[in-house]
Image: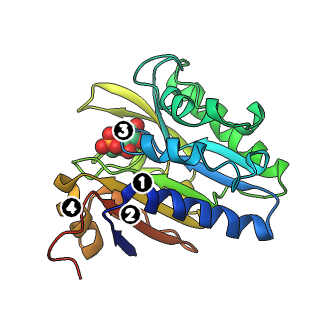
Amino acid sequence: MKINYTNQFVKSASDRIVELLQLTLRENSHFLLSLCGGSTPVPIYEALSERSADIPWSRVIITFGDERCVPPDHHQSNYRMADGALLSRVEIPEHNVLRMEGELDPHDAALRYESKLREAANSVGREMPSHDLVLLGVGDDGHTASLFPETEALKETNAFVAANFVPRLRSWRLTLTLPCINSSKNILFLVNDEKKYEIVSEVASGLSSYPAAQVAPRNGSVEWIVGPTIPKTSS
Ligand code: 6PG
């Protein structure tokens, strides 16, 4: 697990994403990229929208790590956020963007997304919808995607997508599961908040029970890009 503390969070993150994309596309026809939600990634997505000279968008398939159970035009929608910061700004074919249908019944939407993922993987000659890169955030309770502590979706061992009721939010979420996330080739956690440094250290210690600590791909890498400053104690 590699942690890159940086004073240039957006540049470090967007450069690493472009680097992994270009490395993957040397050997593969497409780059399967899962976007995380929340507020942290917005400037990174905006920076990526300026990098179209480096990114053949027609060869990028976009999925979502999670979604709130709201319509796509709702202010809480992760799709709406990503569309505003990135997708509407680049020439990516509509069929390359796999939206989680937050407006539907959560269980139906999870089943539909699981099929979408598998179809997309098969369309580019892959058996399993294992991602080339999954972007993840982390919450102040150690959740990642919409895998919150002590919620049912954390127990999922087969399905790649789950509907997950989150008691602390009193709402349903759609989320990729650990089997899906842990089948990825690369995982990039994005943290840009000094209040989360404690969580980063605890997850890095390997002794944590946080959901974020359960992200451990069998044949993949986990990296953290952490800003906004380099802590005094970091080696
Ligand atoms: C979501 C996210 C969630 C997010 C963390 C961090 O839908 O909210 O997927 O896992 O990444 O809660 O959120 P911030 O970036 O807003 O701190």
Residue type, mark 2 in image: Ile
Q: Position of residue 225 (x, y in %)?
A: 38, 63
Residue type, mark 1 in image: Val
- Mark 2: C-beta under 8 Å from nearest atom of ligand 1: no
Q: Which of the two residues, 53 or 187, is positioned nearer the viewer here? A: 53
The residue identified by callout 4 is 197
Q: Which of the two residues, 11 or 29, is positioned nearer the viewer here? A: 11
Q: Position of residue 219 (x, y in %)?
A: 58, 74
Q: Is residue 145 left or right of residue 134?
A: left
Q: Earlier in the sequence, mark 1 or mark 2?
A: 1
Say if mark 1 contacts mark 2, CB within 8 Å.
Answer: no
Which label sits in the foreground, 1 or 2? 1
Question: In which quarter of the view is residue 233 placed?
Answer: bottom left
Q: Earlier in the sequence, mark 3 or mark 2?
A: 3
Task: State how far apart marks 4 and 2 are (Cα).
Answer: 11 Å
**Residue drawn where x is 42% and y is 32% of the image:** 173
In the rendered view, would you say 51 is above or below 2? above
